[in-house]
Image (cartoon, rainbow, N blue to C red):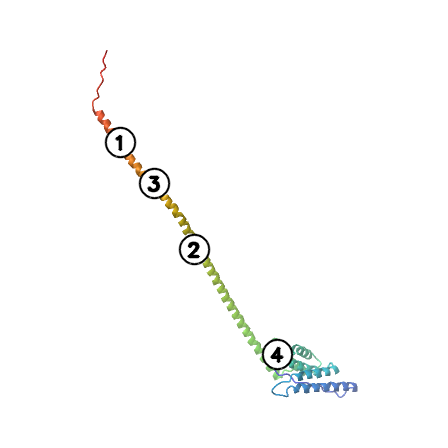
Amino acid sequence: MKIKGLFVAILMLAIALPQMAGAQTERKYIRQGNRQFNSAFADSTKIDSTRFAEAEASYRKALEQDPNSWDASFNLANSLLSQGRMEEAARQYQALGAKTDVEKEKRAAAYHNLGNCLLQSDNLQGAIEAYKNALRNNPNDLETKYNLAWAQDKMKQQQNENQQNQNQNKQDQDQQDQKQNQDQQQDQQQNQDKQQKDKQDQQSQDNQQQQPQQAQQQPEQNDEQMSKEDAMRILEALENDEKDVQEKVQKQKAQPQRRRTQKDW
């Protein structure tokens, strides 16, 4: 962004001689600083930044002669901005723009350069406000209007990018939450499968432990079954014996019995 130009102090003729001497010295240093500042651009292929520092020193000497010199303060702020000392330059421009005892064009120039300074510091909101203050003091400044429009467009782009980043971050977070839920469900399913497998393994182990017991009990059942069969045979044998006995008894009953005659002696 283009920096508003340098100011040269204009002397008032109707001033006392002692003040005239101080003003002449102030003007000498301001002009010297301006020459040093402009000489930094003498070589079109590069900028001699050391000349900005020399100009700064000259402007400070001018302020020693007149601490209230608006022109020396404005040019000093320009030299600070050109050296990349944004915070110092911004404070200087802010103080100059707030002065009410100078022409509005000068105040507009201070706010314009303040906007440039804040713009280079990526403070878009501050730059926009500075350009608006410049236009309040000089509504017809086309350069300030252009800078204001550029800063507003830049801010709109940043807001859109921020919104897109927020949407992307939300989408990433949703995907992360979804993946986390899937992982949790997978872990739960694996735990259930493991519990089911452990249960099956335990049942299989219990069955293996019960099989020897059943094998041991089987002979007992066979022994018990053999005992019943033997008992049946014994019972049948007893019945047969009883049947034989009864037949014998019946035969004996069928034969006449002899009575024994007792003799009467």
Q: Are marks 1 and 3 in contact (CB under 8 Å)?
A: no
Discs 4/2, front: 2
Q: Position of residue 11 (x, y in %)?
A: 73, 87
Q: Neighbour class for label 2 at 10 Å: few (<14), some, many (≥20)?
A: few
- Quadrant housing residue 118: bottom right
Residue drawn at x 29%, y 35% as measured from the top left: 234
Q: Are marks 4 and 1 in contact (CB under 8 Å)?
A: no
Residue corresponding to mark 4? 120
* C-alpha separation, residue under disc 3 versus residue under disc 4: 108 Å
| For residue 234, side relative to residue 105 (left or right) | left
Q: Are marks 1 and 2 in contact (CB under 8 Å)?
A: no
* C-alpha separation, residue under disc 2 versus residue under disc 3: 40 Å
Q: Kindly state the secondary structure of the residue where label 2 is placed.
A: helix
Q: Which mark is residue 29?
A: none
Tell me the amino acid under the disc marked 4.
Answer: Gln
Q: Position of residue 33 (x, y in %)?
A: 69, 85
Front residue of 95 and 40 = 40
* C-alpha separation, residue under disc 1 versus residue under disc 3: 27 Å
- Quadrant housing residue 163: bottom right
Residue corresponding to mark 2? 197
Quadrant where the N terminus lies?
A: bottom right
Q: Which mark is residue 223?
A: 3
Discs 1/2, front: 1
